[in-house]
Image (cartoon, rainbow, N blue to C red):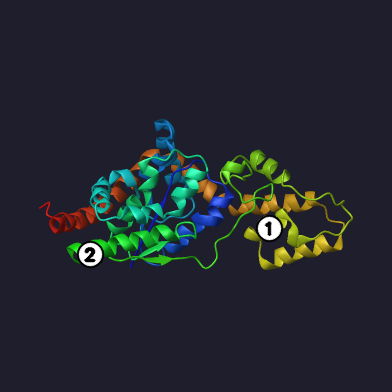
Amino acid sequence: MRILTGIQPSGTPHIGNYFGAMRQVCNIQDKGETFLFIADYHSLTTGPAPDALRSRVLELALNYLACGVDTEKTVLFRQSDVPEVCELTWILNNVTPVGLLERAHSYKDKIAKGFAPNNGLFSYPVLMASDILIYQSNLVPVGKDQKQHLEITRDIAIKFNNQYGEIFTIPDELIPDEVAIVPGIDGQKMSKSYNNTIPIFGKEKEIRKAIMNIVTDCKGLEEPKDPDHCNVVALYKLVATPEELEEMKERYRAGGYGYGHAKMALFEKLWNYFEPMRKRRAELESDIGYVWQILAAGAEKARAEATRTMDKVRRAVGLR
């Protein structure tokens, strides 16, 4: 069973990234052979500065290794270290109907948000299909926003196999039972775009300040409060035991327990929860060469798989 997932490098992670995606990736690696790639080709669609892109690739590798990616179970590599994926993208472009890409929701959404309508955005699903198919992936973890892209991948693979023979494994989706929607300090979904995040690896003072800025209502210390409609409680739930969560809720309802008390409790839980990951990240940061070695070793394994697939593809289409 081969599982594949890719993540775009986007800078410093926050707790929304961890509970919404990073933790799922770390849990998935126990379910089968996992290929995890840093999607730097994909990130080019947003036009990042070259130095920023290089920095973000390393940052993402550090973060995932610190948060629990086990290189004995997971092949961690940089997408662009396997150039065969671009060759496969071109070949798949020639069996992909334009109408299939025109129906892609993500392209329409990005154009609506002001992105330049370039071919990279338009043909993004074909590159994604290449990422999945070149490693003969069985399962691909996807959220609701990416489910259509996997359906497009399946359509492309079936069309290619019908035309050239059974070359590609047809992948299935792996949808997590529950993906945490983490509220930001303003109550919206936590996102760098909204500037409402709590960093994982920030300084103690920075994290404490972010937590103390969580938006609450204006109820006074002695007044009873509603724990089911409070951003502090929603975040506390992510790291507290069921007993600890229930205790906080009872204090809310009883009164005499202020939002400042709840925020301090949240800070302590978050700080302790991520402490082992902060220590691991500090160790990795002290030996950056080791991190690059991990990526190079992962790329070697990934490229060996990609080469086997491309040999079959080239022969099938007449390029050998």
Residue indicated by mark 1: 234
Residue indicated by mark 2: 161
**What is the quadrant of residue 156 in the picture?**
bottom left
Q: Is residue 272 above or below residue 209?
A: below
Residue 216 in picture, x, y percent from top left: 77, 50
**Residue lying at 49% horizontally and 57% vertically, measured from the top left:** 145
Residue 261 in picture, x, y percent from top left: 78, 51
Horizontal side, residue 50 vs residue 135: left or right = right
Amino acid type at image mark 2: Asn
Amino acid type at image mark 1: Ala
Which secondary structure, mark 1?
helix
In-front residue for pair 210/150: 150
Horizontal side, residue 41 vs residue 280: left or right = left
The Cα–Cα distance between marks 2 and 1, rounded to whole angstroms, is 47 Å
In-front residue for pair 105/213: 105
Residue 92 in picture, x, y percent from top left: 26, 53
Q: Residues within 10 Å of mark 1 (few under 14, many from 20)?
A: some
In-front residue for pair 60/100: 100
Q: Residues within 10 Å of mark 2 (few under 14, many from 20)?
A: some
> Upstream in the sequence, badge 2 or badge 1?
2
Q: Can the viewer see residue 208?
A: yes
Horizontal side, residue 253 vs residue 74: left or right = right
**What is the quadrant of residue 197 in the picture?**
top right
